Amino acid sequence: MSDPIEPEAFQDPLAPTLSPGRGALAPRRATDSTETWGIQTALDYGYVGSASLTKGLGTATEQAAEISVIADRRIQDDLVFLIGGNWQTFSWGYNGSNIPLPNNLQALNMILGFDMALDEGSEWNMRIQIDPGVYGTWQSLGWHQVNIPGVAAFSNIVNEDFQWFIALRVDMFQFFPVIPVPGIRWQFAKDWVLNGTAPKPAIQWMAREDLTVFVGGDILNVNGRLPDSDPNTLGGRSLAGTLVNYFEGRVGAGIEYQVTPELALQVEGGAVVWRTYDFFRINDNVSSTMAPYVQAAIRGQF
């Protein structure tokens, strides 16, 4: 039998899923979980300054927020059940006339799945998860906005310093319905970690036991459907009922302070270097210039 890996060496196999808040929530792995419920929460809020939009559409500012709650419980040896919910929202303020872009995009969904150790020594772990919910603007809710994206993620703990991931993310509202996402976690020095996983790759330095400094990137994404009553057009084509993939790439730095063993605060800032509203069904998109951002987050584990 293989020697057990210390719990702190383990990272959630769902991490590489292109999902900002949920990627930070990690149900206890099967071998560390108990038969009592554990709850993890995350609250993120960010503000993006003014940026110019392509096609001469004017400028846009942004507010983005996400609230996630996941409860997990071991239901048998090496198997953990998880259930929770997630609300993600992007809201834009435009400066210009007749801008055809949505004022907001939101996702409200359940989280259902399980974590499982695949072998006796627990070096291999797997998560299967689905996120049924409503994805789009909330101006006119309907069945056409219902979607059930999901992920199958695998993690292999090579040793206490190195772990690698592979995930398959499935989303029928996305241009590529299936996306493979690899990643690694490497503690290459005593207080240094290379966290090479989406959505938030970073180099982390533990300055002291309760304070971590990080530099890296962040990928924010929501895929939704616009209302059937949307009157706008882009490139001469109607946006009514069309799908939109919104992606945002950030580069920044920040700190995370462990207030108590159960509660952590995170503050960061930097630049949005890439943003696109992709209306792939009508073969058109809108992007923007760079813009500064600030973000604050709270993480809880109870």
Image (cartoon, grey):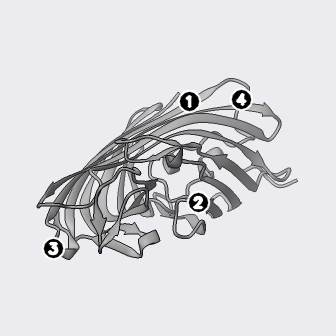
- Vertical arrangement, residue 270 with respect to residue 288, above or below: above
- Vertical arrangement, residue 287 with respect to residue 150, above or below: below
Marks 1 and 3: which is nearer the front?
Answer: 3
Q: Secondary structure at mark 3?
A: helix
Q: Secondary structure at mark 2?
A: loop
Q: Which residue is mark 3?
A: 56
In x, y percent, where is residue 89?
36, 45
| Residue 50, visible in the rendered structure | no
Q: Which residue is mark 4?
A: 34
Snapshot quadrant of residue 277: bottom left
In x, y percent, where is residue 59?
14, 63
Marks 3 and 4: which is nearer the front?
Answer: 3
First in sequence: mark 4 or mark 2?
A: 4
First in sequence: mark 3 or mark 2?
A: 3
Q: Amino acid at mark 2?
A: Met
Q: Which residue is mark 2?
A: 172
The foreground one among 297 and 131 is 131
Q: Answer few, some or many: residues within 10 Å of disc 3's Cα (few below 14, many 20 plus, some between 14 and 19).
A: few
Q: Which residue is mark 1?
A: 39
Q: Answer few, some or many: residues within 10 Å of disc 2's Cα (few below 14, many 20 plus, some between 14 and 19).
A: few
* Residue 152 relative to residue 231: left or right: right
